[in-house]
Image: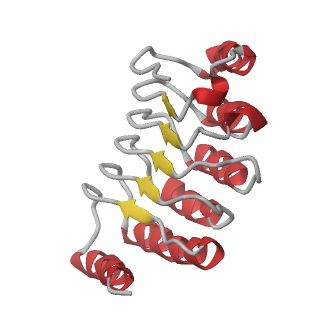
Amino acid sequence: FELNSRQLHDSEVSLLVNLLVASPVLPTISCLSLEGNALQAKGVGAIMQQVVCHPAAANLVTLRLGHNPRLDAKAMAAIGEMLRDDQCNLKELYLNNCNLNPAAGTALAKNITGSRTLVRIDVSNNRLNDSAVVSLHEASRVVARRSGTQPTILFEGNPVTQAAFQLVAAGALSRACM
């Protein structure tokens, strides 16, 4: 299901949620793409709780929220909180080009550790610093211990130092060689 670049705001999310939940196609949706909108924490929280983690959305494994420049630490906390839900089957989470700052990256890292299904997180082309990227890397290791699979984190285009890049790359290489 795709609703990209429609300038969807939090105020319109309840209408979208109601339509999706009432729709007989919800069980068949594997990807929800809401890229290029104006979503914020309240709207993303409602989408996660009422759609992504809905019992009928068992096949929904990909959430694309890239190019939503109003997402912040509160939005990342809302996403992470729902990733812990047993009804949440997200495998891929795209948050590329969202203008995420270091606080948002750290909030996401703190909250993804409860996921049992994530295998890919795209936070490329944001404003994440070394600390946020390393926190995400460490959180992915916690997810690996819980689920048996360490998520791939795409972080290209963030202003990280070579030292942080090497740390994350070394972790990825050691995982690939297992």
The colouring scheme, among rainbow, by chain, secondary structure or one colour, is secondary structure
Report x, y in % for residue 38: 49, 24
- Asked whether residue 102 is in view, the answer is no
Residue displayed at 56% across by 29% down: 29
Question: Which residue is more in the foreground, 160 or 167?
Answer: 167
The quadrant where residue 145 appears: bottom right
Q: Which quadrant of the figure contains the C terminus?
A: bottom left
Left or right: where 128 falls relative to 13: left
Q: In this view, does 12 lie above or below 81?
A: above
Residue displayed at 55% across by 58% down: 118
- Asked whether residue 133 is in view, the answer is yes
Q: In this view, does 98 lie above or below 43?
A: below
Question: Which residue is more in the foreground, 59 or 52?
Answer: 59
The quadrant where residue 111 appears: bottom right
Report x, y in % for residue 130: 37, 71
Report x, y in % for residue 37: 45, 24
The quadrant where residue 48 appears: top right
Question: Which residue is more in the foreground, 49 or 37?
Answer: 49
Q: In this view, does 52 lie above or below 78?
A: above
Residue displayed at 42% across by 29% down: 35
Left or right: where 57 falls relative to 90: right
Marks counted in the figure total 0
Question: Which residue is more in the foreground, 107 or 93?
Answer: 93
